[in-house]
Amino acid sequence: MAMNNFIKAESLKQFLLKIYHCKKDFELLVIDKKPKTKMGVYIVDKRRIRIYSKWTCATSLEEIAIHEYAHHIHETDKRRSTNRRLERVHGPEFWRIY
């Protein structure tokens, strides 16, 4: 990861922590790509948020980061069921958090 993307990642993480301080730490990476279908992704098992920086023309990095952070909060702080399959990824609980 380039140094510039590292600085973006650190500032985005601090931005998110000012919104809500989650119980579990997470990693945030800014990747210099534009996949066809994803602006960002939350990897549950690794507690990692990946933001794809080439999507900035469609939406801001902050907006993408907030969306993925909502997934992290849902998974680590707010999940109601121990069976993840019982709750949809973009279900009502996710949207309340977001």
Image (cartoon, helix red, strand yellow):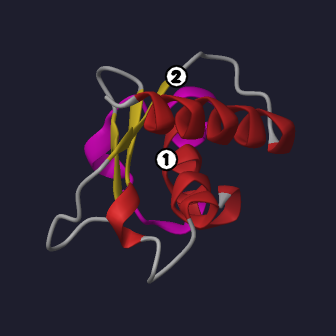
Where does residue 60 sit, x and y in percent of width and height? 57, 70
Q: Residues within 10 Å of mark 2 (few under 14, many from 20)?
A: some
Q: Is residue 25 visible?
A: yes
Name the side, left or right, on which 51 lies relative to 72. Answer: left
Magenta span: 73-93
Judging by the rendered image, the residue that carries numbered circle 2 is: 26
Using residue 16 as the reference point, say whether residue 93 is left or right of it.
left
- In this view, the residue in front, 79 or 6, is 6
In this rendered view, identify the residue nearer to me: 44 or 28.
Answer: 28
Task: Identify the disc placed on residue 71.
Answer: 1
Quarter of the image with the N terminus is top left
At 64% across and 34% down in the image, what residue appears?
A: 13
Q: Which mark is residue 32?
A: none
Q: Residue furthest front?
A: 3
Q: Assign a secondary structure to mark 1.
A: helix
Residue 82, magenta (yes or no):
yes
